[in-house]
Amino acid sequence: FRLAAEAYGNRARKLRDYNLVKGASDGKLRYPPKQRFEFYTFLIDTIRSFDRNVSISLCRETPEIWNIFKDRCEPKKCNCIVW
């Protein structure tokens, strides 16, 4: 949170207002699936408005989220590595 606060100031405080849930398999804190669905929908739509063919993946997400977006991106493909 400290890095977000430095970058975004008071706007970052809203990030703490959500009830984060702990992932069953990895124990990471995440926003609830509904918020993640809304976020990724907006993000994918925005990216696609600029480039319909760019590779989008959600490799760090849960299988639940992968299944929701499997027709809109390559959720299991990893784009984290340098090409």
Image (cartoon, grey):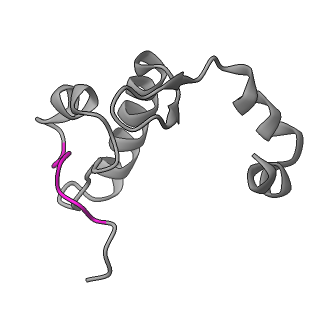
Of 47 and 77, the residue lying toward us: 77
Taking the spot 21% from the left edge, 54% from the top edge, the residue there is 52
Looking at the image, the residue that sits furthest to the right is: 10
Residue 14 x %, y % = 76, 28
Outermost left residue: 71
Quadrant, the N terminus: top right
Q: Residue 23's spot in the image, x, y percent?
A: 42, 29
Q: In the displayed structure, would residue 14 be above or below residue 73?
A: above
Query: What residue sits 16% from the left and 28% below the top?
Result: 67
Front residue of this view, candidates 33 and 26: 26
Which quadrant of the figure contains the C terminus?
bottom left
Q: As drawn, is 2 to the left or to the right of 70?
A: right
Labels in figure, total: 0
Q: Position of residue 54 (x, y in %)?
A: 23, 62
- Our reading of the magenta stretch's main secondary structure is loop
Whether the magenta-drawn stretch holds residue 11 is answered as no
Residue at 24 percent across and 25 percent down: it is: 64
Hey, which quadrant is residue 75 in on the image? top left
Q: Quarter-wise, where is residue 17 in the image?
A: top right
Q: Residue 51's x, y, as percent?
A: 27, 59
Residue 41 located left or right of residue 12 = left
Q: Which residues are magenta?
A: 73-79
77 within the magenta span:
yes
Relative side of 5 to 15, left or right: right
